[in-house]
Image: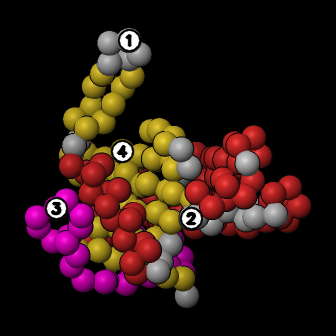
């Protein structure tokens, strides 16, 4: 199956967890995931999994590309959080910022597990998406995508433009991957 993946990770999650303590941090994560959910639904994305402070979102190709849905999802998630900034500051004294990596390609999908069964995606696309997201720190940006994705997702939300950053050798990869970021006008 051909799909788009977005890995969204809260910045400085370890420091936030230490500062808030277990219970408050857990509630912080619950609020974060709840507050960004409408943006995911509006963009026709699907939550694939939660991994600690990270959420993995997936789109069928046609849904993620249509109307710039994948990129719009990122900007709408930011907007929805910004709308609730004061509540985060009043409740936690911290506002969640996050970074995302986006990539697309072929994956295997099927049932996995003996004791606990689940539908799982498998393939290099997931590894590459994770590695792209890691590069946000290097480039000091909140959003990075592969050129492969950017070339097919040419329809962007109004006011958003693509900026090429060149080729990068991602951790664990032999071949270079072209990466881009997106900026608002």
Report, in whole angstroms, how far the alpha carbon at label 3 lies from the one at label 1. 32 Å
Report, in whole angstroms, how far the alpha carbon at label 4 lies from the one at label 2. 27 Å
Residue 9 visible somewhere in the drawing: yes
Q: Earlier in the sequence, mark 3 or mark 1?
A: 1
Residue shown at 59% from the left, 58% from the top: 13
Tag on residue 173?
Answer: 3
Q: Earlier in the sequence, mark 2 or mark 3?
A: 2
Residue shown at 22% from the left, 35% from the top: 108
Q: Earlier in the sequence, mark 2 or mark 1?
A: 2
Label 3, residues with CA under 10 Å away: few <14, some 14-19, many ≥20:
few
Query: What percent of the width, then of the height, locates residue 150?
Result: 31, 70
- 1 or 4: mark nearer the eye: 1
Q: Nearer the viewer, residue 170 or 79?
A: 170
Residue 162 is a magenta residue: yes
Report, in whole angstroms, how far the alpha carbon at label 2 lies from the one at label 1. 33 Å
Circle 2: element type: loop
Report, in whole angstroms, how far the alpha carbon at label 1 lies from the one at label 4. 28 Å
Contact, mark 4 vs mark 2 (Cβ under 8 Å): no
Check the image and report above or below for 57 versus 162: above
Residue 88's image quarter?
Answer: bottom right
Check the image and report above or below for 49 versus 15: above
Q: Earlier in the sequence, mark 4 or mark 3?
A: 4
Q: Which residue is mark 4?
A: 60
């Amino acid at each position: 199956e051909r799909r788009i993946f977005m890995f969204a990770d809260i910045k400085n999650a370890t420091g936030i967890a230490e500062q808030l303590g277990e219970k408050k941090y857990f509630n912080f994560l619950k609020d974060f995931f709840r507050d960004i959910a409408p943006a995911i639904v509006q963009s026709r994305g699907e939550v694939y999994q939660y991994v600690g402070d990270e959420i993995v979102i997936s789109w069928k190709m046609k849904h993620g590309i249509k109307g710039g849905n994948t990129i719009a999802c990122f900007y709408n998630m930011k907007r929805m959080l910004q709308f609730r900034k004061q509540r985060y500051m009043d409740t936690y004294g911290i506002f969640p910022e996050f970074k995302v990596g986006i990539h697309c390609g072929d994956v295997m999908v099927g049932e996995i597990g003996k004791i606990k069964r689940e539908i799982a995606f498998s393939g290099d696309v997931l590894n590459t998406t994770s590695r792209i997201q890691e590069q946000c720190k290097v480039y000091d940006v909140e959003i990075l995508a592969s050129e492969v994705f950017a070339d097919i997702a040419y329809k962007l939300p109004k006011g958003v433009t693509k900026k090429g950053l060149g080729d990068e050798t991602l951790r664990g990869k032999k071949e270079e991957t072209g990466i881009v970021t997106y900026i608002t006008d």
